[in-house]
Amino acid sequence: MSQDITTQTAPQSAVPMTHKEILEALSGLLVAMFVAILSSTVVTNALPTIVSDLHGSQTGYTWVLVATMLAMTATTPIWGKLADLFSKKLLMQIALVVYVGGSALAGVAQSMTWLIGARVITGLGVGGVMALIQIIIGSMVSPRERGRYSGYIGASFGLATLIGPLVGGVIVDSALGWRGCFYVGLPFAIIAFLVLQFKLHLPTTKREVKIDYLGSVLIMGGVSILLVWVSLAGQQFDWASTTTVYMVGGGVVVLALAAFVEAKIATEPIIPMQLFKDRTISLATLAAVFVGIAMLTATTYLSEYFQTSRGMSPTHAGLMSLSMVVGLMGTSIVSGRLISQTGRWKIWLVWGMVGVVAGAGLLATIDHSTSLWLVGLYMFVLGAGLGATQQNLILSVQNNVDQANIGAASSVVAFFRTLGGAIGVSAFGAVLSHRVTTHVVDGLGALIAGGNVTPQQAKSLGDGGVPNVATLPAPLRNLFEGAFGDATGQIFLLTVPFAVLALITVLFIKENRLRTTLDKIEEPEINMDIAAELEAGELGRR
């Protein structure tokens, strides 16, 4: 089920952009990246107020987050494939317009259903922005030079991650109220749109393309079913239940049909199956799943840990993320520059994953009484590992594909990273809730028996909900803070095996020297050490 369309896309041999032109276009891309990350982080601290004002439930609270992530995940490969078929600049501008529309609708939401629907639209736009940034950079700069510019993306990611919760907390407490959180990114989106309009100039040529509608529907359907299942399992129904069998079975069947369509039927498949014949792409994709689990678990549950277990305000909790952001920004920029200078990238992937394993392992030791200085140090280690890993996984993939498939290949890595993170956050969230409840119920018995609290007071914790800790009597507050802090460490312990699997995976990735051309040109195999010696000798003669 494909349809012929004549469109424009970059030709296979394009004139390289100058450094000045790249920086001008990159400024628009960085603003777009800032907007995409800000849209998620700025609303986090506002959600309790939003749900209360719109008379929502805990399920609605969860779905405001899940809806955006689901839309991003399900459509990432579609944006990537469209980037191989249509103007990348136009697609980025469309993604920004979709984001603006979704945010505007969310800002005037009158019910939880309205808000969740608006966040789905926002997720469509954010997914496009996140997928297209790496793709556009891959079309502007050769892999050898790409590292220095990818570092700026890591820095932009870190900045938006840091100030998002701070800005959100300030806006909620201001006269703008929680609705202002959905409008704070709109001026930046408009600026990004205009900068890209005037500064991004990618060569185009006409070609006939076929849109794979059937594959798109099946991919979105299969992924959506699985994400809905993992977000509701353990809350709306048991993990081991008939509903689980139906949803998992249905999702797997739909994805199997999608794989068949992509491999045998589609002329221009959304996810070209032949990409996975490449060892680097297959291993990088697998590693991306595991990296996504570690990355999103950290960014999701550490903020909650600081507020719920350590009694911090949303603004203070946002400041605590500074250590992880500094680590991420530092290694992202440094690794990018050194990769451009040396052409070596695998060493950064390996040591980056060592940092992720170490950081997750160290965070697995935290509880409600761990020194905040130690927690900050552990976060720095994890952030440093992620900074050297997430951008370079995509770089390794882009180096192995030609310009015709760079969009699909880049988005595949981003897709599986987001999918792994979505599954990890949902599954670990259920585990966290269960362990906190177990700790609290066990502790309540001892408190009641010792006469420290009355059965009526204990009832406020015994229902398994998330109470307002500040209003609890001291014994109950100490019990809940201790239970949540201890359970958070246990959650990070669960991420360690996935981080180890990611490390093992990248060890088996074959390092090919970064090409200096935009498009892939068949070159004879050459040993990386010999290549470095030849390059050093050539530079010496100059």
Image (cartoon, rainbow, N blue to C red):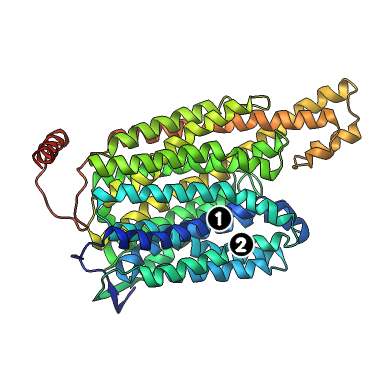
Nearer to us in this view, 222 or 415? 415
Sequence-wise, which precedes: disc 2 or disc 1? Answer: 1
* Discs 2, 1 touching: Cβ within 8 Å: yes
Q: Residues within 10 Å of mark 2 (few under 14, many from 20)?
A: some
The residue that mark 1 highlights is 38
Question: What x and y, as percent, mark residue 363?
Answer: 55, 29
Q: Secondary structure at mark 1?
A: helix
* Quadrant location, the C terminus: top left
Q: Is residue 105 above or below residue 483?
A: below
Question: What x and y, as percent, mark residue 197?
Answer: 40, 72
Specify the amino acid type for callout 1. Answer: Leu
Which label belongs to residue 184? 2
Q: Is residue 478 above or below residue 403?
A: above
Q: Secondary structure at mark 2?
A: loop
Specify the amino acid type for callout 2. Answer: Val
At a point 58% along the width and 43% down the height, the residue shown is 300
Single out the residue that lies furthest toward the top.
450
- Write down the quadrant of residue 429 in the picture: top right
Nearer to us in this view, 51 or 276? 51
From the viewer's perspective, tell me whether residue 208 is left or right of residue 61.
left
Nearer to us in this view, 151 or 271? 151
At a point 45% along the width and 71% down the height, the residue shown is 194
Q: Is residue 22 above or below residue 287?
A: below
What separation in Å lies between label 2 and label 1 (alpha carbons)?
9 Å
* Quadrant location, the N terminus: bottom left
Question: What x and y, as percent, mark residue 333?
Answer: 38, 43
- Write down the quadrant of residue 435 in the picture: top right
At a point 40% along the width and 50% down the height, the residue shown is 152
Q: Is residue 374 above or below residue 533?
A: above
